[in-house]
Amino acid sequence: MKKMAGLFLLGVAALGLAGCGPKGNGSSGEANTDGKKKAKYDLLVWEDQAKAAGIADAVAQFEKDNNVKVKVTEKAYAGQIEDMRLDGPAGTGADVFTIPGDQVGTAVTEGLIAKLDVDKATQDIYTPAAIESQIVDGKVYGLPKAVETQILYYNKALCQL
């Protein structure tokens, strides 16, 4: 089930965010005989460092199902939004990337991400707090990749609460 969910989310995110990435048929290419660039890939995905192996099966299935070539590049999670600020306008940014939920509003304001067409059933997969972190002005701009719960541990001997 996790594999299916991962594949589904990758597909939705890739298709929805494709408009945010480079124009044309890929960000990297080689010259054809007519002087035009031949794409080596259709979608560029930035994945956190040392985590690309975790999405390899989903990427392979997505490529097969959609007849596209996906290039996965590992980049530090914390720096992906900054890289998009530079690479996005240059046309070399990712089609799919990860940013913290609290940076979605800033990314929308800066024009780094595009609205996704996500139906209610898909939104209902997530907890209300998780999906709300991806919504700006009533529009969905991303889908949660992970949900975390922060816990505070304390030493009763040192603290009075």
Image (cartoon, helix red, strand yellow):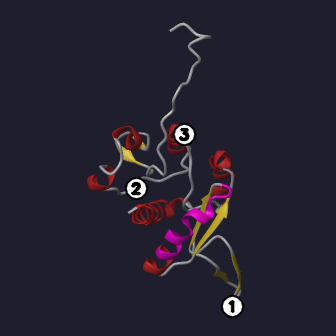
Q: Which range is magenta? A: 49-61
Label 1: element kind? loop
* Principal secondary structure, stretch drawn in magenta: helix
Which residue is at 33% across, 51% downward?
125
Query: Which one is in front, 94 or 23?
Result: 94
Are circles 2 and 1 on residues that touch, CB within 8 Å? Answer: no
Image quarter hosting the N terminus: bottom left
Looking at the rendering, which quadrant does residue 156 occupy?
A: top right
Left or right: where 100 falls relative to 142: right
Identify the mark at residue 34; answer none if there is no mark: 1
Q: Which residue is mark 2?
A: 116
Residue type highlighted by circle 3: Gln
Q: Position of residue 126 (x, y in %)?
A: 36, 47
Q: Which residue is mark 3?
A: 103
Q: Is residue 151 placed above or below 105 in the rendered structure?
A: above
Label 2: element kind? loop
Q: Disc 2 and disc 1: Cα gap in Å?
A: 36 Å
Q: Earlier in the sequence, mark 2 or mark 1?
A: 1
Q: Is residue 148 placed above or below 54 in the rendered structure?
A: above
